[in-house]
Image (cartoon, rainbow, N blue to C red):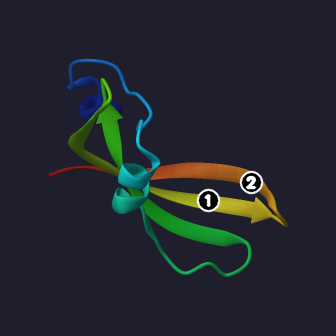
């Protein structure tokens, strides 16, 4: 995973427009404790062709952990 991320020039940044962020976010089923999601990476404030699969675990309303599973190059 780090190989794909490090091959891109520039710096990983946040998406500046919240609507663009939510347009690329895909959430799986939430069972009350865990959720699977995919989201695009942003480099130098621009959307890249990298996306990541991650798994978030919650304890009530608190985020307990996020695990990055895979990075995809499109």
Distance from Cα at disc 1 to Cα at disc 2:
7 Å
Q: How many C-alpha atoms fall within 10 Å of the one at disc 1: few (<14), some, or many (≥20)?
A: some
Q: Which mark is residue 63?
A: 2
Identify the residue at horizontal 43%, vertical 58% (top origin). Answer: 22
Helix, strand or loop for disc 2: strand
Residue 57 point in image, percent of width and height: 69, 61
Q: Which mark is residue 56?
A: 1
Front-most of 47 and 17?
17
Instruction: Determine contact: label 1, label 2, CB under 8 Å.
Output: yes
Q: Earlier in the sequence, mark 1 or mark 2?
A: 1
Q: Residue 72 carries which label?
A: none
Front-most of 49 and 54?
49
Residue 73 vertical position relative to residue 36 in the rendered view, above or below:
above
Residue 56 vertical position relative to residue 35 in the rendered view, above or below:
above
| Left or right position of 7 against 62 | left
- Residue that protrudes farthest toward the left in the picture: 74
Res 48 → quadrant:
top left
Front-most of 33 and 11?
11
- Residue that protrudes farthest toward the right in the picture: 60
Residue 56 point in image, percent of width and height: 61, 59
Q: How many C-alpha atoms fall within 10 Å of the one at disc 2: few (<14), some, or many (≥20)?
A: few
Helix, strand or loop for disc 1: strand
Residue 31 point in image, percent of width and height: 67, 81
Identify the residue at horizontal 44%, vertical 34% (top origin). Answer: 14
| Left or right position of 54 against 63 | left
């Amino acid at each position: 995973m780090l190989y794909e991320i490090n091959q891109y020039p520039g710096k990983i940044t946040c998406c500046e427009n919240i609507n663009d962020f939510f347009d690329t976010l895909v959430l799986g089923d939430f069972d009350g404790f865990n959720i699977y999601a995919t989201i695009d990476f942003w480099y130098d404030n621009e959307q890249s062709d990298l996306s990541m699969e991650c798994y978030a675990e919650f304890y009530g309303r608190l985020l307990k952990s996020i695990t990055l599973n895979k990075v995809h190059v499109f």
